[in-house]
Amino acid sequence: MIMHQPISYAYLETTNYCNLSCTFCNRDEVVKKLKHMSLMDWELVLEKLKDQPIKEAKLMGLGEPFLHPKFSTICKMFKDYFPKSFLIVATNCQYKMNDNFKDSLKYIDLLYLSIDGYKESYEKFRPPSKWSKLINFLEEIKRVERHNCKITCNYVVNTENIIDISKIEQLCDDYKLEELRLNIAQDWSEDKSLSNTDHISGYSLEQIEYLKENYSKNIKGKAPWTWSDCFWVKTGIYMTVEGNLKVCALNTDTMSIGNIFKDPVDKILNSKRMNEIREGCTKNIPSKHCKNCSYKELSPILEKLIKQ
Ligand SMILES: C[S@@+](CC[C@H](N)C(=O)[O-])C[C@H]1O[C@@H](n2cnc3c(N)ncnc32)[C@H](O)[C@@H]1O
Ligand code: SF4
Ligand code: SF4
């Protein structure tokens, strides 16, 4: 039996509050009870994780991280426990810039601003966002002290918003965003396959050619990819705001494998269900948990898009 190795990558949700209902996000299906994690519970989480060699962490989940009223303290506490780790956060920019945001930048290494479309299409895929609110936020971003935080744009690509990528490239220049990251839209539900999602699958040959010729370097992801390449089952972990541990961020509506407040982390990582999921990946015979994995489903298209 293959054991889980120590955790080097952690994806930790500290709030599931959100002010948007994005069309490509499965938050509405997953989040039932709204919660900000208390600082006391956060301390307990960090105590439980402190012996793990976490190199990279994302402090986000199915919520808007900066709606947590103490998010800057959440980031500071994380960095106090893991001073050498690389901390990544994403934000939807749909709120008024405040001190909570500004203070957080002292601790965050990489911040993604989630912008996936221009004007009408931005508002269409991120309801009830307002383009004007985004622009106000970007004006503030221009002036804010960034400390050592790299600020980039994260663009979730679908068949309808490809046309806007060049405008957002210009926006990145105008507002000094350091990179335009393109992520082909994924589906984070266990029972759903991307092939059933029209605006996500079904890129035309022209669109593929256009993306490849112009944006190959901006496209994120690994290809070719198969289940035995999955790092999550070996060295990663995903935690919800209730402390429920899940295997990965690619299947967020699945049953949890245990709760960080109730059981030792090593016991959860090597529980029967976790072992079965890991074994399925290792042998390339995916368990139900991994059958519709978006990494696998996107591999053929990413192979076409990413110039080797
Ligand atoms: C789940 S969000 C949480 C942070 C924040 N609420 C936001 O939207 O930036 C984290 C990142 O995942 C991206 N995302 C959401 N749904 C996605 C999907 N189906 N495929 C790929 N990326 C997705 C978002 O655009 C965002 O950049
Ligand atoms: S992508 Fe982010 S902003 Fe949009 S609904 Fe999901 S968590 Fe909220
Ligand atoms: S769904 Fe399975 S294969 Fe895909 S990332 Fe998650 S654990 Fe890995």
Image (cartoon, rainbow, N blue to C red):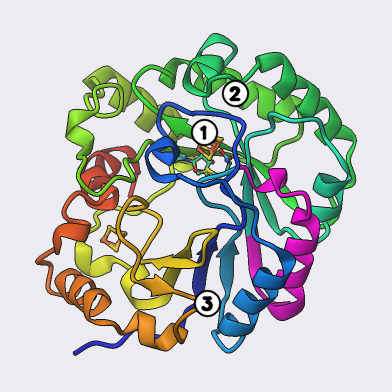
Q: Which residue is drawn at 69% across and 63% down?
A: 38
- Res 247 → quadrant: bottom left
In the image, what residue type sits under mark 3? Answer: Phe
Which range is magenta?
Answer: 64-87
Dot 1 and dot 2 residues touching (CB under 8 Å): yes
Q: Seen in the image, is 86 located left or right of residue 165?
A: right
Relative placement, left or right, of 303 versus 164 is: left
| In contact (CB < 8 Å): disc 1 and disc 3 | no
The residue carrying mark 1 is 155
> Does residue 231 appear in this view?
no
For mark 2, give the secondary structure.
Answer: helix
- 73 inside magenta stretch: yes
Any mark on residue 261, and which?
3
Residue 24 within the segment the image draws in magenta: no
Residue type at mark 2 is Ile
> Mark 2 or mark 1, which is nearer the start of the sequence?
1
